[in-house]
Image: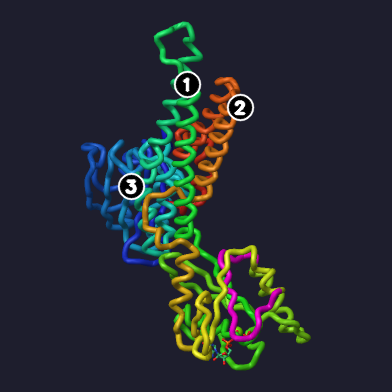
Amino acid sequence: MFETIVALATPPLKSALAVIRLSGDDCFSIVNKVFDKDLLKNKTRGIHYGHIVDDDKVIDEVVLLTYVAPNSFTGEDSIEIMCHGSMLIANQIINLFLRSGARMAVNGEFSSRAFLNNKIDLVQAEAINDLINSTTEEAKELSMLALEGKTSSIFRPLKSHLGEMLAKIEVNIDYPEYEDIEEVSREYLLENSKYLIDEINKLINQGEKNRLYHDGLNLVIVGKPNVGKSSLFNALLKEDKAIVTNIAGTTRDIVEGEINLFGIPTKIYDTAGIHESKDVIESIGINKALSIIEKADLVIYLLDESNEDLELYNSIKDKKHIIVHNKADLVKEKNKDYVYISALNNDIDPLLNKIKEVLDIDDLAIVPSLNNQRQLGLLRKMVTDLTRAVKDLNDNQPIDLISVSLLAAYNSAIDLLGEGNKNDLSDEIFSRFCVGK
Ligand SMILES: Nc1nc2c(ncn2[C@@H]2O[C@H](COP(=O)(O)OP(=O)(O)OP(=O)(O)O)[C@@H](O)[C@H]2O)c(=O)[nH]1
Ligand SMILES: [Mg+2]
């Protein structure tokens, strides 16, 4: 029994049309109370034109889409109302439904109902939110793969494989007296645990790469004064945003910009040139530059023909970084191992190619992947549990003990798809969604 929920599914702004959504056992009877046609006489999936009325007063002329359980997104009886896109009208209609017995939906409650009613698994539910938040074509494609269930279906066979191993152990432990039951061998468990570890590690690698499409990338440009950081920033942004002059110490504050870098939503930070400075303002800028390195997923350490600054190099060397030589137009003899660019001339392709290489983007074809923190965390936990099983098998530990580790891995697989205790999971995950989704 599900209470009937209602929410505005479109943005709360003036627009041509607004969509109000209801879902739950009573939605036909609730809407029927304020609609000037009888929806209960013939409860079917359909489109209905009519008026929303409050006693005799017409609130709006609307079109209703009706869905009958289980053939709806949520798996429940659902109705979508298209009204005129005035917030006054939308609020009046929603208030009528609230008075008639519906309650306001909380964030993500429609998706959470779809999940609770087994219309979608948890990976698909998370994809709905990813889809809405996608800012690049690639991120959208990844979300669609997950929403269509393709991502879950690359994982399900691994879960079944593990389930089969556990079932074999179970039979052996429960019925040791039956001689005709094939004894589960240590070799079988070892071989299959190793196989699963390899396969899950492949999923983790792919997920880590694809995660960037959703999470984005922070790219920080650092270097000594005057090497051309702001020029490179502008070239990447294709816009004259940062001030460029031939005076060392031009950039003081951090300048930020956003670009779509091979489908990855990327924030770029231009920083003050790092050197010993007595100037108070410049020193603050330099400290800001050093602290933003902490936030970087990728640092571009820009040099010109002047010497490298070892101290600066030390502060970035533990980060993923690329050393780039700017002002290639002035260089007579090039070192074949260096990445050369000329920011001034917008000649930055060698850097873009290097970024692709460092982020392994050529392999980043859009394939189904488990790529959010929750999913990756559970995959890593599975690897840890399976690795313990392998170690215990090698140490000749009892099969009971090994089954504990395998069962722990299996439970993570269940959590990943959201097949365990659904109510435990849903609140935290769905609270990140929009209302009406
Ligand atoms: N020849 C040449 N000059 C360049 C190139 N890139 C930048 N410059 C020049 O180098 C000078 C400094 O450029 P900026 O981009 O302001 O350097 P910056 O690293 O941001 O400098 P600060 O903000 O002072 O740290 C300017 O005169 C640019 O025109 C390049 O590829 N070739
Ligand atoms: Mg600058």
Q: Identify the element where label 2 is drawn.
A: loop
Residue 354 coordinates in the image, percent (x, y): 48, 70
Q: Identify the element where label 1 is drawn.
A: loop
Which residue corresponds to the image point at 66% horizontal and 87% vertical from the top-left?
A: 249
Q: Identify the element where label 3 is drawn.
A: loop
The answer to whether residue 150 is visible is yes
Task: Report the residue marked by disc 3.
Answer: 148
Residue 106 coordinates in the image, percent (x, y): 49, 47
Q: Which residues are magenta?
A: 294-310
**Mark identifier at residue 395:** 2
Task: Report the residue marked by disc 1.
Answer: 185
Looking at marks 3 and 1 on the same chain, the residue that comes earlier in the sequence is marked by 3
Mark 3 vs 2: CB contact within 8 A: no
User: Quadrant location of residue 246?
Assistant: bottom right
In three-dimensional space, the C-alpha distance between marks 2 and 1, rounded to whole angstroms, equals 14 Å
Mark 1 burial class by Cα count in 10 Å: few <14, some 14-19, many 20+ = few
Which residue corresponds to the image point at 44% horizontal and 52% vertical from the top-left?
A: 129
How many numbered marks appear?
3
User: Quadrant location of residue 23?
Assistant: top left
Of 99 and 248, nearer the camera is 248
| In magenta segment, residue 428 | no
**Mark identifier at residue 233:** none
| In magenta segment, residue 300 | yes
Mark 2 burial class by Cα count in 10 Å: few <14, some 14-19, many 20+ = few
In three-dimensional space, the C-alpha distance between marks 3 and 2, rounded to whole angstroms, equals 43 Å
Identify which amino acid the numbered label 2 is placed on: Asp
